[in-house]
Image (cartoon, grey):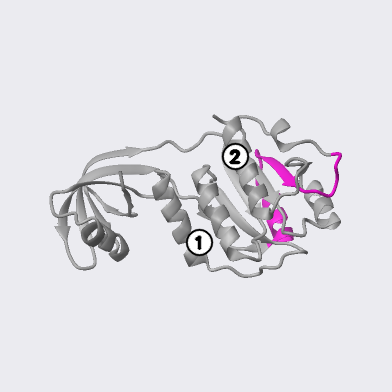
Amino acid sequence: MYLFYTNDIRGDFAWFSEEETKHCLQVLRHQVGATIQFFDGVGGRYKGEIHETAKRHFVVKISERKVEDEKAGGRLHVAVAPTKNIDRFEWFMEKATELGVDEITPILCEHSERKSLRAGRLEKILLTASKQSLRARLPVLHDMISFGEFLKKCETTGGEDRYIAHCRSSEIPHFKDNCRRGRNVIVVIGPEGDFSDGEVVMAGQSGFQSVSLGKARLRTETAAIAACHIVQLVNE
């Protein structure tokens, strides 16, 4: 089953972008009357028949719709320092989406080597991964901010469990032993050079508990995926 995407829904009809049109009409060769399934990125799943086609868009008449309830708990927000090799960060984005991440915030840390991102490209990766994993909700990608700014933002929220995964100490508990089922979680993952001692202290002052992801020394993107997988397993 191929899942299309649009957020342009007007009553009983849905309009699709030029990119989706090319894939639907030229690649898959669907025609008027064909039934397709699609989602709107905010929890809605739909089924309908192609009603009208044009060069740069097509229209579907909706026959079925279902809206998934928002998670009452178990939401995951990962803040991670982008890797120097952008391919590795893009791989993280794809796999985190498959594992059910809800929000991603790229952060700038003292040891960060990458200080800019192409948000448009990353959004496309999230969309493609959501289609492939049949998600009804797109992960939220926030703008890149400094680690300090991120901590300040977290101080204005409440109700979530906060963790900072790092290798600065061998005397910290494993994330899997502290992650609790049904809880909203924020976990922060540092750059290739890890967080600085000062950043770990700042995080602790903002309510973040230090945790380990195991004895092995993990790449940034691997650590972030490990954290996502732990939260997913705890909430299954």
Measure the C-alpha gap from mark 2 to mark 1.
21 Å
The x and y percentages for residue 215 are 78, 41
Number of the label disc, if any, that sits on residue 229:
2
The relative height of residue 231 versus residue 205 in the rendered view (above or below) is above
Q: Secondary structure at mark 1?
A: helix
Q: Which residues are magenta?
A: 146-171
Q: Is residue 116 left or right of residue 205?
A: left
Indicate which label's residue lies in the foreground, 2 or 1: 2
Earlier sequence position, callout 2 versus callout 1:
1
The x and y percentages for residue 167 are 80, 48
Q: Is residue 29 left or right of residue 146?
A: left
Residue 90 found in image quarter: bottom right
Residue positioned 72% across, 31% down in the render = 177
**In the picture, which quadrant includes the C terminus?**
top right
Q: Is residue 236 visible?
A: yes
Residue type, mark 1 in image: Leu
Residue type, mark 2 in image: His
**In the picture, which quadrant includes the N terminus?**
top left
Number of the label disc, if any, that sits on residue 170:
none
Q: Is the residue under label 1 in contact with that under label 2 (CB below 8 Å)?
A: no
Q: Give the labeled residue for mark 1.
A: 122
Residue positioned 55% across, 55% down in the render = 91
Q: In the current view of this chain or complex, which residue is farthest to the front?
A: 216
* Membership of 151 in magenta stretch: yes
* Membership of 129 in magenta stretch: no
Q: Is residue 12 left or right of residue 76?
A: left
Q: Is residue 156 visible?
A: no
Residue 197 found in image quarter: bottom right
Residue positioned 72% across, 42% down in the render = 213
The x and y percentages for residue 67 are 36, 39
Q: Give the camera-side residue of 50 and 64.
A: 50
Callout 2: 10 Å neighbours few (<14), some, many (20+)?
some
